[in-house]
Structure formats: structure tokens, C-alpha cells
Amino acid sequence: MKFIALCGFMLATLSQVAFAQGPTPAATPTPVTDAGARISRSASERSASSEASERERVLLERIERLERRLNELESRCDTAAAAAGKDAARTALSAQPAPPAGSTPPNAVAASQLVNPQPLPNAVPAQAATASQQRQAQANKPLVMPPYAAWNKDGVKIIPYGILIANLNYNSTGLDTGSIVGFVRPDIPTNPAQFDISPGNTFLGVDIKWPKIGEWEINGKIDFDLRGPTPLRGIDNIFAPLFINAYVEAKTERYRIMAGQAPDIVSPIISNSLNAYPFSYVPGKLGFFRPQARFETYQPISDDFTFIFQGAIAQAIQTFQVGDEVIGDQAGRPDGQMRLALGYGKPDPHDPNHRRPFELGVFGHIGKRRGTQLGRVIAQSDFTTWSGDIDLSFKIGSRLRFNGEFFTGSVLGDYAGGIFQTFNPVRLVAIRAAGAWAQLTYDINDKWQVNAAYGRDDPYNRDLATGQRSLNETGFVNFYYKITPRLWVAAEFSRWRTTYVGLPTGRAFRVEPAVFFFF
């Protein structure tokens, strides 16, 4: 419309110029008879031509000034439209949380890795778009999440993050504990079905970033969920912090030194199960979290392959369960943990665990535990806790990934192995166990992800007493759907089976939907 108005104005102005210069009624010519008359006529023609040129120059200057004013008006309209679009975008963004810095859901993408969307095929060019069209385009444009907000104190950045989680589940028979699952209780009449709603998996924390010292990044992390100090207990309406990470680290591209509490080096892959998400548990997976001092190095051995070494001296912690009349404790020595791995390719920045396209590792631990049996006579024995393990992760194409781990070892209760059992409380003998789990993950598109997995934890029967658990297994299928980058929904369907020495086998079908809100 502005362009049409400008053309109309110029045509009107040029018409005025044409009429001003148009021919006057013709006078009867008079013959020229002398040279002076010729000179006079020539001078008058030059004067008329000069006046016409001056008039044209003035009119052209006026047209140029009008064009400049119209351009200024167009710029102001464009600026106003852009400001209105930005205000609308800010209003919409203020209602959306930032993704967590630290633990993130599977297939999540950091805000700094998002790119501006491509324009629509039928988008109107900015030069030809009206203000209303530009406002409509701003309203239709997909929103890009802003970078993480941070508190800055004397050069130290403190970045809060978290996942607000609410999970609802129905269990066809009693599971321990119910809102999360360790195993199935025996199939007896006093073991009814369960229904739970729990926010206990909610995960909160902060990342702390100090100024760099040369090439070394200095970072810290503190986070926790709400499962409390005894997660495998049946109190579902009393929540307390269960600290997972609380450490400080110094790292470069090839080295990392860490001290504090963190997840174990053993069994580094985390499944995508909704059970106890984000540090999901399936039978056959080892590892918990404990105080430790850790050293890691990542050394390239070619353009594509990287050698990985991880080692730690770790605190021995109380086991999950021993018995009513038996105390399990440390023996005054730290645990040693180590992992050697070969990785192919670069870590995937879109993967929450920063896994490479292919990674194969062997890992294990060794330490001491002490068992004290209370009774008329106090008996005490020391046991060696150890494990030997293999982990494998690789991508198949661009959307499918396989993850799996295998373990064997002894006295694995505080590493979540042996179905949380450490030693036989009757005979005071160590419980040995072997297990494995495997998972396929398929990213249907940017919004949908599907997972299928099986896990199995199998203690040696000859090491067990009556009433102890002899096998624990599960299979599950789940999906995740991103409504927005920060609001997810998911649902999991799983089948659990736990066998016992001298007690009926427990079986349960579990349905668990969940909602995740990342910030």
C-alpha cells in the first residue's frame, strides 16, 4: 500500500509539471527581418528553458524529500512491529522453564544447541511485508528457549536446575516399595495390589562454575531427589533429600579430577526406565552413589578412537539390607573402582550421557565389608566385595541405540546387586550374584521416543538362607513425548518377577504414567 501511494503521489506531481510546461495558444508568427530580432528571440528561449530547468530541479528535490520521509515512516512501522513481536515472544517464554543443567531426560537438547527455525516456504519477504503481516509472522514463529539463567557472584556462576516429576502407578500385586520398584514381594494373601501417586523422584540442584585457571575449568555440583536416606521403605508421603551429587571438579578436554559424592564408576550407563527416574533402576544394573576421589583421562589414539581411563577411591557405605539381627558395616578400608573403555567418534552433545556412537568398557571394584551377628554369641566376619563387568553402547543408524551391561561379583548389596543382599545372615557367608540388562532406544522423531528393555539379577542359590531372594527380573516398554522442550509426558508398562527360597514367587504387572517439567 505504501508503494502504491508513493507512485500515485509522484504521478500527480509530474502531471503538475507537465501542465506548467505545456504549450500556450499559438500566436500569429511574425517574420523576422533583422539580426537583432533573432538575437532577442534566442535570449527569450534560453530564459524560458532556464526557468523550466529550475522548476524541475525544485520539484525533484521535493520528491526526494518525500521519499525520505516515507522511508522513515516505513522504518518506524517495521520497528514497532518487531518490538510487538519481541514483547509477545518474551511473554510466551516467561511461561516456559529452562532445561536443566546437569541431568536431563533422554534425547534432550541443550538450549545453546538449538538453532533458529527455517522460514516457512510461503513467508512474505521483510521488504514487502506490511506491519500486520510481520506481526502475524512473529506470532507464528516457533519459540527458541533462552539460555540458562544464572546467579553471578564475584565471577562465580550459580545455575539452578531441576526436574519436577509426578508419577502415578498401579501394581497388580505388592512391590517394594510401590512408588518405585526394587523387587516383588512374595505372593501371599497379605500382599494386595497397590496404587501410588508420588512426587518423590523430583530432582533439584545447582551447577557452580568458578573462573578458569589456565586451561582448567573449575566446577561444582549439588543435587538431590526426595526419596530420603532409606529409599527402599514404604513411607510414600514423607519426603526428605537424598543427595546424589555433591562435589567439586577440575577438568580439561583430556583430564578430570573430582572429589565429593557422585555416582559410582561401575555400571556407567543409565537406562531410560521411568522406575526411579532420572537414575533409573532395572535388575542387572550395578551402581549407587557414594563419597569418592576420582581421576579420569580421555586420550585420543587416532582421529576416531579414544582411550578412556577412570579410577576412584570410594567410601564403603551401609548396605541396603542384611537382616534384623545382623549389622553390615565397613571394614576400615576404601573401595577401589576402575574402568577402561574404548570409544569411537565424538560424544553426542544431544545425548544426556554424552555417549559416543560406539563405546565398549570393562570395569570393576574391590573392597571389604564386615558383618556382625547379634545374639547370645556375637559372631563377626569380614567379606570381600568385588565385581567384574562389561558395558556396551552403540548407535544403529541415526535413530536406534543399543545399551547393555553384564556383571558378576560378590557382596553387592550396596552396589544394588544381588537383589540388594550382601551376605547370608544365618551362616555369615557372602552372597555371589550375576546379572545383565539390555535396552533398545528408538527416536521416532524430535518429539517421540520408545524404549524396550529386559533386566535380570540372579544370586547364587547355594549362598542363600530361607526367605532370601533368589532371582529378580523385569521387562518393560515405555514412551516419552515432548509437548514442549520443557514439558514431557511418558508411560511405562512392565512385568516383574521375584523368586524366593522357601516362599511363593511374586509376580506383578505395573502401569506407570508420569509428567516431567524441566527448568
Image (tube, rainbow, N blue to C red):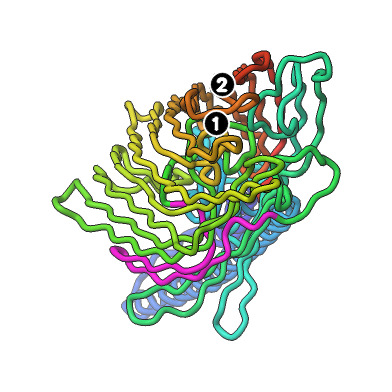
Q: CA distance from mark 1 to mark 2?
A: 7 Å
Q: Is residue 479 left or right of residue 163?
A: left
Specify start and end residues of the magenta stretch as a single range.
242-264
Dot 1 and dot 2 residues touching (CB under 8 Å): yes
Callout 1 amino acid: Val
Q: Is residue 160 visible?
A: yes
Residue linked to disc 1:
282
x and y percentages locating residue 326 in the rendered image: 65, 45
Kindly give the residue lying farthest to the bottom in the view shown.
154
Q: Nearer the viewer, residue 59 or 451?
A: 451
Q: Is residue 307 left or right of residue 257?
A: left
Callout 2 amino acid: Thr
Q: Circle 1: is it few (<14), some (14-19), or many (20+) Cα within 10 Å?
A: many
Q: Which mark is residue 43?
A: none
| Above or below: residue 8 compared with residue 71 | above
Q: Tag 2's secondary structure?
A: strand
| Above or below: residue 383 compared with residue 253 | above
Whether the magenta-drawn stretch holds residue 339 is answered as: no
Q: Which mark is residue 474?
A: 2
